[in-house]
Image (cartoon, rainbow, N blue to C red):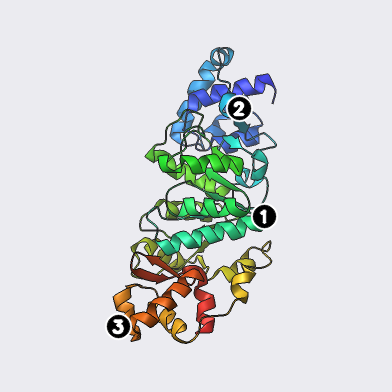
Amino acid sequence: MDTATRIEYTTLLSWVGDSTEGLGALIAESGSPAAAIFAQPERLAELPSRTQQVLHRARSHWPRVCSSASWSGDPEQGSQFIPITDTRYPPALRAIPDPPPWLFCRGDVACLQGPAVAVVGSRRASRGGLEVARRLGETLAGAGYMVCSGLALGIDGSAHVGALDTGRTVAVLASGVDRPSPQRHRALARRIIGGGCLLSELPPGTAPAKHRFPRRNRIISGLCEATIIVEAALPSGSLHTATAALEQGRDVYVVPWSLLHPEGAGCLRLLRDGAMPITSLDELQDWFPRIESIDSQRLDRPQPGGAAAQLLELLGDAMLSLDELQRASGLAPGSLLPLLGQLEVDGWILRDADRYEKNPATVSTTARSC
């Protein structure tokens, strides 16, 4: 990007802040920020009123502001500025109805060019949901997909961690790339920079703010060919991401949850409205062709039988205590505890203190053996 074009972009950035709705598409079709600002009045009239106001002010002050532009990015922190006219800009994101006019990146920009899948969900996720998200991230990244999420606590963080174990991941922020949040995920953010990138349309130094998250969500879905919702309450940011994906013409998949699970109510609503269910990790290869096999070691090991299979059937969708399992199964503690311990070691169940639940990642395989 030559100096004159960079000055145009940085000048426009200083004017619009986060009022970018409609601006990315206008710059993409015009070819440059200056051409976009001086677009035909009827084209500008198609933009949201707030964006129109910013561009009208920019038009009247353009020569003076351009001559004094001084913003130059944040090279010390390793951020890179990627305008929509740059060849490094992700093609999938450029194709959505409202693409960001620019992106800021910390990490490997090249990972934005390949196939990508978003995995998002509740911040207050269940243990089973966290495990499913981790396994999804691990499986998809291992097959060559870039796993995209929002760095939030809960499902997002687990998806990033799983992806980093086998491949690459991108975290899209509602802040500058030098100010990732939440604080508890600062270490994870550093890992992501080394195994993918942090991405935002907001310039370095921008603090996270609640009103910026919905706009962030359209970038998560826009980078990807599909979005997978693991857990989502009503209402939730995950549902905003799913809605953005549908508006962008992208596929939405949902992991079903129990009717009694409050953080799964949004998933059930999406399924009712036509989203595609993912009922086992085995099914991923049907929807994502890069995946040739799913955890063959798990599929090849002996399936639970006898009393172990009975315990899995008793658990169903519920989380039961040791006493409840003992009463329901009729097994003595000396027989019950070794069975539960082996099921936990083999990954069939998850334990939280003295309560147990079926591992959702193994549900379909368990069902075939019972």
Dot 1: element: loop
Which label belongs to residue 144?
1
User: How far is disc 1 from disc 2 in space, using C-alphas?
Assistant: 35 Å
Q: Can residue 199 be seen in this view?
A: yes
- Specify few, some or many for label 1: CA neighbours under 10 Å numbering under 14, 14-19, or 20 or more: some
Residue 327 has which mark?
A: 3
Q: Is residue 222 above or below residue 269?
A: above
Give SS at disc 3.
Answer: helix
At x 60% / y 76%, what residue is drawn? 301
- The total of numbered circles placed on residues is 3
Say which quarter of the image contains residue 37.
top right
Task: Confirm whether residue 230 shows in the render.
Answer: no
Q: Position of residue 306 (x, y in %)?
A: 47, 87
* Three-letter amino acid code at the position of disc 3: Arg
Percent x, y of residue 129: 44, 62
Question: Residue 357 lies in what quarter of the image?
Answer: bottom left
User: Of label 1 and label 2, which has the lower sequence position?
Assistant: 2
Q: How crowded is mark 3: few (under 14 residues within 10 Å), some or many (20 or more)?
A: few
> Is 21 situated left or right of 266 in this image?
right
Where residue 88 sits in the image (x, y, percent)?
Answer: 68, 37
Horizontal side of 201 relative to 116 (left or right) equals left
